[in-house]
Amino acid sequence: MKSLLAVCLGSLMSQTALAAEGSALKLSGFGTVGYWLSDSKDDLRFRRELSQNGPKIKDHHELADTRLGLQANYALTDHLEAVGQLVFREKAAYSNRDTVEWAFVKYKPNHDTDLRVGRVGLDTFMLSDYRSVGYAYNWARPSAEFYGWIPFYSLDGGDISKRWTLGDGQLKVKAFAGSTHTGMPWADKSYPLEAVATGVNATWESDEWRLRLGHTRMRFEKNAPFDQLIPYLQNPVVQALWPSAAAYADDLKLDGQHLHYSVIGLAWERDGWQVSGEVAATSAKTVFAPQGLSAYMSVGRRFNQWVPYATFARNWNTSKLKLSPSPAPVLDPLGAQLNQAYESTHTNQYTAAVGVRWDFAERLALKLQWDRSVISPTGVQMWGDGTIDWRGGSKHIWSATVDFTF
């Protein structure tokens, strides 16, 4: 698709640079400065993605969308390139290691084959390579229902891709494998979430169309903080009073559990019209991991420097915690904590948004957006990581961002 995306990615992949022409070293970057407002005061805390610290963003609204990325490409030979990318953004667990988004060597034996080894982008959906590059899309941010609940950005391992001409477009097939990690907020602290990921995807792209199919399999390597309930559920006295406690204890063990994520995406651009959408299915054996369907659709129309747009996104949670009533009042707090663990790992909401993008200068874009989200009482994962007093309803978010590349 010959579009704004191509211009933006060209900038980040060495087409423009802060180095002298002909130099082996190319430098580029991107960033966003943003701010948001909400319509009401309640226990729900807006955040762009799960790995962000909700209380901090509630006190500092500019942190949700603001970020800065720096990229360096160095051509070692005609077939070998080293690429590094740093991204500074709000995260619950901040470290120098996690600031490094990309750090890989790419080997290109011929014009249609790429092999990358090191820290590469985790290629799970259409925006994988430019999820943090706000200038590359029209919205203030990718939809939380589809992108926000997946906290992983990078993969320590590698990928291989191959391209073929197919019809009036090009088909690209990629396979990847490695480990991924991030820090997740929990109460006033954070915990590490780690997984081994493997996957394959195929993308067909022409001047007007882009079609993508992909599947990712993850095996979690550590338990989540709610594993502290396991010893209580394994207590012989508790199991004698509450026979289903043993099954709950097994279900709470995230370490070793597998999650499968399948996605299909479609985008079309013609005569100023810009239409895109994705649908994904997530499955796991434990109810304490995300399961269900997620999707979004976006329609925009460019009028010179202006792009008004509208989006709709939905996340359907299909798993249910079948919690049998506790047989004794003394076990009620344990049941309440099981419900809390379940609600903190599931998203069940939909959002309608309208906005406008104004490209007021070269490589600068101002965006204004209004979101109305309707959140289920049992699907508040995006809005907090602990006990939330929410009986269902809607939230309104107004956002303003300025995106840039250089």
Image (cartoon, rainbow, N blue to C red):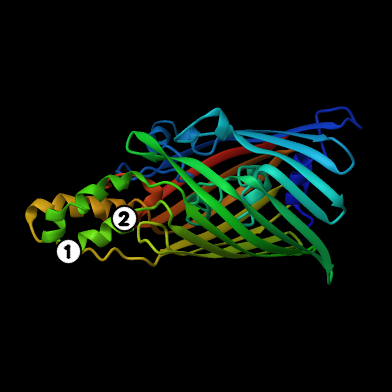
248 displayed left or right of 194: left
**Amino acid bearing label 2:** Tyr
Answer with mark 1 or mark 2, whichever residue precedes in sequence: 1
**Residue farthest toward the front in the current orientation of the protein:** 236
Q: Quadrant of the N terminus?
A: bottom right
Quadrant of residue 303 within the rendered picture: bottom right
Between label 1 and label 2, give the one nearer the viewer: 1
Q: Which residue is mark 1?
A: 243
Residue closest to the eye, 158 or 209? 158
Seen as rendered, the residue at the extreme right is: 22
Kindly identify the residue that appears in the image at 80 percent across and 29 percent down: 18
Q: Which residue is mark 2?
A: 342
Q: Is residue 269 left or right of residue 96?
A: right
Q: Position of residue 245 (x, y in %)?
A: 21, 59
Give residue 351's position: percent from left, percent from top: 46, 57
Vertical arrangement, residue 64 with respect to residue 161, above or below: above
Give left or right: position of 242 versus 83: left
Quarter holding the C terminus is top right
Q: Is any atom of residue 234 visible in this view?
A: yes
Structural distance between the alpha carbons of marks 1 and 2: 19 Å
Residue at (31, 41) in percent of width and height: 41
Q: Residues within 10 Å of mark 1 (few under 14, many from 20)?
A: some
